[in-house]
Amino acid sequence: MTSEETPVGTLPGTGALLDVRDLSTKFDSPRGAVRAVSNVSLSLERGQTLGIVGESGSGKSVLSRTIMGLLPRSTASVTGEIIFEGEDISGFSDDQYRQFWGTEMAMIFQDPMTALNPVMKIGKQITESLRRHMGMDRTTAHDTAVELLRSVRIPEPAKRFDVYPHQLSGGMRQRVVIAVALACGPRLLLADEPTTALDVTIQAQILDLLEDQQRERYMAMILVTHDLGVVAGRAHKIAVMYAGRIVESAPTRKLFADMKMPYTEALMSAIPRLDAPPHTKLSAIRGRPPQLVNPGPGCAFAPRCPYARDLCSEERPVLRPVEDDPDHLFACHYPVDSAESIEIKDHLRAEQMVAEAAGGGDSDGW
Amino acid sequence: MTEHVDPDPEHTEAETRGVGLAPSVIGTAEAVGVAIGDTVPEDPEGKPDAKGKIGIGGWLAISWLGLIVALALLAPVLPLHDPLEQFSGLASSGPQTGHPLGTDALGRDMLSRVIWGSRASLAIGLGAITFGMLIGGFLGLVTGFFKGRVDAIVTPLMSLLLAIPQFVLALSLVTVLAASADVSDTRRILVVILGLGITTIPILGRITRANTFSWSEREFVTAAEAVGARKGRIMIRSVLPNVFPAMLSIAMLGVGLAMIAEGGLSVFGVGVQLPQPSWGNIIAEGRNQLRRAPHIVIFTSVVLFLTVLALNFLGDVISKRFDVREGQL
Amino acid sequence: MGLLRRLLQLIVTVVAVTFFSALLLQLLPGDPVEVLAPFSSEEQRDVIREDLGLDDPFVVRYAGWLGGFVTGDMGNYYTVSSKRPVSDRVADALPISLQLMIYSQLISLAFAIPVGVYAAARKGRIFDKFSNATAFAMLAIPNFALALLLQYFLGVKWQLFPTSGYTKITEDPSMHFQQMVLPCVTLAVGQFAVYMRLLRSDMIATLQQDFILLAKSKGMSSRRILFRHALRPSSLTLLTVAGLSVGTLIGGALIVEVLFQIPGMGLMLAEAIATRQMVAFQSLIAIVAILYVLVNFGVDLLYSALDPRIRHDRTR
């Protein structure tokens, strides 16, 4: 992380902050190895936001914890490279990681109800890392913590310093968790479903807070979520994960304008839309999330994919760039806009219209 | 509603295990949980298998207890010396031909005394727990099932019994109830059973009550009530069988504890009275021979220890197997 | 629960406990005086009967006894022709018993906390499996048998520690501690096993909480995470069980005192039983029971002082 450790040819402060190459994470289980993350590559520039989107079980949380080095070493085996500031940290021990945690990278968890120590005052939970990493004395740490609480918009921060987590609401607790994560000025923040456990009204506030903090501190962020809507306006890049693999990744605008992967399309139709007429049915993705133990040879999404053909269950599509656009990658034999898929889509639409017409007829009593 | 009319404890076990998995593999629950529906979590206790399989340890425990019970039952027909017969000139001697475990201070055969002693110890252990199960179990079942006024009256009274340390309670009851010098051996054993049994009432009562309480809230019970089954019948037919494993698991520990407690009473001279042997009084009396004949204490202690260990082990297996929630004692 | 309600509950429990101990004399089959002083003359018996108020109804006698008890009159030891107050000896014996229990409690916690914490941190590894199996076995060791085995092996055979007796710490501190080693270890073994296993399983659950991961992800050392973040919430459970297990500890201490000839409450009880001094017996039982009630009361207060999540807020 210091300049001496930086490989020759890369100047500190330039290039990608994080470069993940061919990363895989496996867990041992009685039924065989669980391949939670397979061959993931991605990169993130300083100050930018990467959205990682997928259903539960897609491996997105495991991916973020692998990058953070937080998985239990006894059960998880990690291969591939995690290059942070030019240094491969994937083989780091806990002791080596400890120098990074808090100061270089920090994490926010899904449920603020459980992420704070219930028997420690919230101020103390902030100051302990300030004192450890920044060598602050008690008073300075206290004052800094109060400032942090203020910056995450906790009212009356000086008073709140001495309260216990159970005395705060969920939204307030998540703000405290954010303050804890930001305390030592990390360059990379991993936010694992930071708003999933919160009220809808609070969600936007927390996301805005994260965005503001990120901009002020010129901090990179990985925003992990199951909701494409959360990252839509906030991430520079989006990677869609399915069954432990990245199945599509692109700069946000491109992804929304020209999605290739049927799974991305399915996630898209799962976002509630404000402009849709009320009571429009949200199409949940049918079928169950995939098997991660002994996966078949084909595309993991094939069993649930409306456009799947024989080839899909026989051969796994590789992640390839869209023609003349190396930034936009996808893994699909028959992307959403291919002739084959359009044919099926038209067919499905026609079927649906027939069904609706028939349904209408029934209710008329004919 | 209909899906749950199924008083099978295995059912809940699976459910709880699924939930229990989540935190057991930090951060991987998401992936692993989805990938392998009902994974067995890592053995949480280290001892018996997490799933409550009997395992090698369990079979060893069962074999040991089987052996002890068989010897106790067959004692009168086994080719043993009379446990009261004194071999003159052999007092306090160690293991030798004819006396594999040696003899005690009065030259009585130790093997015979240990085997005959198991009768008193087992009778007391089983008797006390049966008594506690019947009374404590009944009170727990009724208070947990009917709640309300019965619960409000009986439960505080049961808790009051817990206000006195168990051994002290047993000691005072036994001392007083068997105070006169001319109490017969059988009568004294009954008093010890009663005294120890009373101390187990609140413990078995609480466990039963807590379990009954949670089972009686289940859908299949409410369903049975809805179709008009009689309350008492539901309690006996639907709730009791589900609560029983928890009672049994505690009872196993209780048998061991009661056998140990009899030894404690013997230290105070109010347990089973010599010359009739019990494991407790053999050890308690053996203390006078500790320098000359330590084998008296050592052999009997090992037998008592292994028996209690086997009981505890099986209690643990039962509680794992039926997913009994511990704590709340 | 307010302090007032707790106090009220305490008083009710103490009254119930003393009532029970007073009932003991009532439960004696036959004439209590016959038991107390079997070889006394009829006149001497009348004196004792008068002294005990045996001709009064039970409630009156209980009230009289309770009145005396709270003012320090714990009845008398009766011999054929004389009596000695019980309270004289209780003043010496009670502190000795307390000392024994406190030492044992400290020893067991001193071992159980680090072993439990490290076993949880190394869950499933050799240290964990070994310590957990050992503790499981320890739970099955009868305390009186352990006392005798320690006496034999460490006292008689290897001559490491004295096997019996008691010396005041003020008289000869070195002798005091040497004599206390075996009895305290005897008591501590069982307590250790209970605390260690409890702390271990509680810590394993705590270590899987998100807040531990948060502490880790902000770069705290493993030691700090284990002892500052994880132990504190788990220690509340430990405290509750430590309070409850004082009951076991008291029972064990009484037995151990007899076996090691330590002049505490246990030895007094044993003598009272052997010499059929039922009045003394009754008072001694009452004292021991009240001690237990008070300890639990103290634990209760301590618990609410330590847990910031006010009472029923615990999720588990």
Image: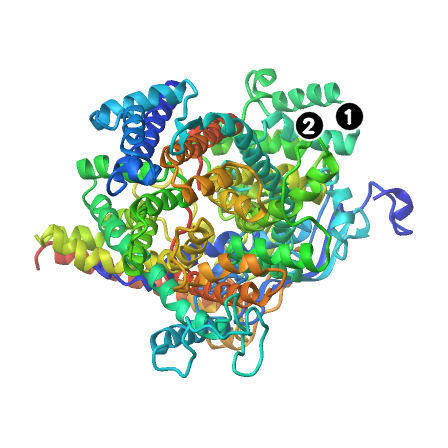
Of residue B300 and residue B288, the one placed in the foreground of this image is B288
Residue at position x 75%, y 29% in the image: A131
Q: Residue A134 appears at what percent x and percent y?
A: 78, 30
Residue type at numbered disc 1 = Met
Q: Residue A98 appears at what percent x and percent y?
A: 75, 44
Above or below — where is A340 with respect to A227? below
Q: Give the residue number, with chain letter if any, for mark 2.
A: A127
Q: Mark 2 lies on which chain?
A: A
Q: What secondary structure is found at the residue carrying circle 1?
A: loop
**A24 with respect to B226 (left or right):** right
Quadrant of the drawing holding the C terminus of chain A = bottom left
Q: Is residue A55 visible?
A: no
Q: Rate crowding at label 1 as few (under 14), some (14 to 19) or many (20 or more) other CA atoms within 10 Å.
A: some
Labels 2 and 1 in the same subunit = yes
Q: What secondary structure is found at the residue carrying circle 2?
A: helix
Residue at position x 70%, y 43% in the image: C178
Q: Tell me, yes or no, whether the two marked residues, 2 and 1, touch with CB atoms within 8 Å.
A: yes
Q: Give the residue number, with chain letter if any, for mark 1.
A: A136
